Amino acid sequence: QVHVVESGGGLVQPGGSLRLSCSASGTDFSVNFMGWYRQAAGNQRELVAGITSGGTRNYADSTKGRFTINRDNAKNTVYLQMNSLQPEDTAVYYCKAEISLRAYVYNYWGQGTQVTVSS
């Protein structure tokens, strides 16, 4: 059994910063891709940023230059540093971990954390 747990999020003023964390825990597994997605009210879920186990990163065009994703492979943890936040960044942010477990690959999602950017 693998669990993915997020932390961080909250209310911040425009131009502010937040840091999200996501950890995968369990036994006998390895983590491949880890990514952050977001879903605003009435919109589809979209990729914000992702990182492979080898450190290759990709970002949505709307977050390039403002958001930074990093991971600690030893802790199976991924971090999302969000700077210069704007109201349009308001959404529920979800972590996804692509996990190899007993020769199969599964996608595990966190429960989501609310990010609200408002004055």
Image (cartoon, rainbow, N blue to C red):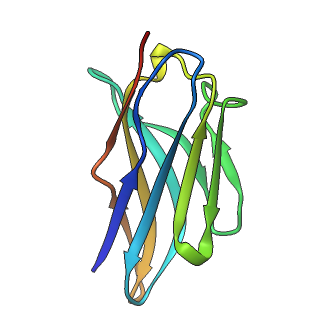
> In the rendered image of this protein, does residue 75 appear above or below residue 47?
below
Q: Nearer the viewer, residue 12 or 3?
A: 12
Q: Which residue does the image show at 41% across and 38% down from the upper left? A: 9
Residue 36 in the image: state x and y as whole percent: 48, 46
Q: Which residue does the image show at 33% across and 55% down from the upper left? A: 110
Residue 80 in the image: state x and y as whole percent: 56, 46
Q: Nearer the viewer, residue 44 or 37?
A: 37
Quarter containing the C terminus: top left
> In the image, 54: left or right of 17?
right
The image shows a total of numbered marks equal to 0
Residue 100 in the image: state x and y as whole percent: 45, 78
> Looking at the rendering, which quadrant does residue 46 occupy?
top left
Residue 3 in the image: state x and y as whole percent: 31, 70
Q: Which residue does the image show at 63% across and 39% down from the upper left? A: 59
> In the image, 33: left or right of 43?
right
> In the rendered image of this protein, does residue 72 appear above or below residue 63?
below
- The residue furthest top is 119
Q: Nearer the viewer, residue 54 or 92?
A: 92
> In the rendered image of this protein, does residue 99 appear above or below residue 16?
below
> Looking at the rendering, which quadrant does residue 102 occupy?
bottom left
Quarter containing the N terminus: bottom left
